[in-house]
Amino acid sequence: MRASTIPGLDLDPFPGASNCISSPGARPGAADNGSTGGRSRVTGGGCLVTVRPQGGNHLNLESLQILIRLATASLAAALALVLVWRTLNRGRVGTVRWRVRRRHSVRVVLVLGTLLVATGVVAGSQIGRSADTLLLLALSVALIALCPGFQDSVYGERGVQRGWYARRLGELEAWRLIGEHLRWKLFGEWVATDVPASDHAALRARLEALAPGRESAHGNAGFDPVRAAATKSNS
């Protein structure tokens, strides 16, 4: 059974016909076909076909646009939250004196990968060039670039930050200056903020004034049992 193909249309041969046979009485034209929801057409060769418009693509496009808008709204809300969070942390830390960005290369790879995907989406489809899609891609890149790293460290005039969380010096539950770090308790766990050794004396004076009696003689989160065992054996 032969069937003609017309882009964007579904063509079904006349039911029960094994071949499209020319008929002298068949004249090319179209007529309604209520049983199939489309229109029947007799081709020039006498082949009766049913033409049904394809509405699925239109529905899929609308669904995709709705998903894009929902994702854009979610990313916009997340970005607003990150900006507010950064502002609060900046208020606690004050003027930054020392900042360490760990895993910076990972962030760069993520941003570049997102830009590469965005370029492919924009170049590969018409919907990729729509305003909604472009906004979604821009928000994705901005969110990756602005989110604090979990291992990032910030030391400022008024406080310290580790990852997403910052505390004023007077808010520290416990602290200890060791090596090139200020170790302090966050939610009951010891974390470390990088502080240049040259700033230790001034920082200690401020900590003793703002958080008196909270210096810990223990709680070194950087304790290395292997190194300690090696030191003990050598002694």
Image (spheres, helix red, strand yellow):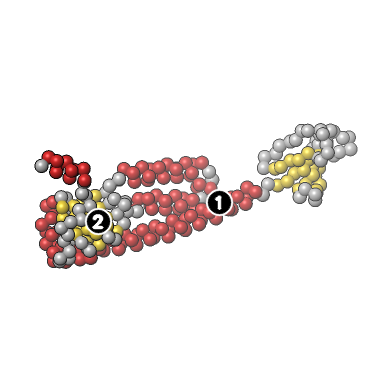
x 16%, y 41%: residue: 230
Q: Is residue 22 left or right of residue 104?
A: right
Q: Which residue is mark 2?
A: 190
* Quadrant of res 164: bottom left
Q: Is residue 105 left or right of residue 16?
A: left
Report the front residue among 231 and 63: 231
User: Residue at the spot x=29%, y=54% of the render?
Assistant: 163
Mark 1 Cα shell of 10 Å, populated few (<14), some (14-19), many (≥20): few
Local secondary structure at mark 2: strand
Give the vertical position of 94 relative to 7 (above or below): below
Disc 2 marks a residue whose amino acid type is: Trp
Q: Which residue is located at x 10 percent, y 57 percent?
A: 201
The relative height of residue 124 versus residue 91 in the rendered view (above or below) is above
Q: x%, y% of residue 16?
A: 83, 39
- Which residue is under mark 1? 64
Of labels 2 and 1, earlier in sequence is 1
The percent position of residue 96, horizontal first and vertical second, equals 21, 56
Residue 180 position, x and y percent, is 16, 50
